[in-house]
Image (cartoon, rainbow, N blue to C red):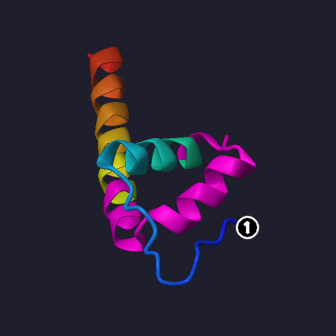
Amino acid sequence: MLMTEPGHSPRKATPLQVVKAVLSAFVGIRKRAGHERDVVTLSPVHVIVAGIIAAVVFVLSLVMLVRFITS
């Protein structure tokens, strides 16, 4: 596991890194090094918010696709 030195705060993840982590979790592919880096840099609140937004976008896109196909 990736550890930081005492007294040094870990870098904060950028919004793009949060989105990449959430999308890779949706698909189910993630390298161990990426996961360990995310554990240190990602905030649980950011991951939860990004996950909820991604889930809503996914469900809405499926609904729109089904409506398009059935119309």
- Vertically, is 51 above or below 70? below
Most foreground residue, 33 or 46: 33
- Vertically, is 4 above or below 46? below
Most foreground residue, 2 or 20: 2
- Where residue 19 appears, as percent x and y from the top left, is 39, 45
Residue at position x 66%, y 44% in the image: 30
Residue at position x 59%, y 39% in the image: 27
Amino acid residing under circle 1: Met
- Where residue 2 appears, as percent x and y from the top left, is 67, 65
Residue at position x 46%, y 41% in the image: 20
- Vertically, is 48 above or below 18? below
Residue at position x 37%, y 40% in the image: 58
Span of residues in magenta: 26-50
Q: Which residue is mark 1?
A: 1
- Where residue 12 appears, as percent x and y from the top left, is 37, 61
Q: Quadrant of the N terminus?
A: bottom right
- Where residue 61 appears, as percent x and y from the top left, is 32, 32
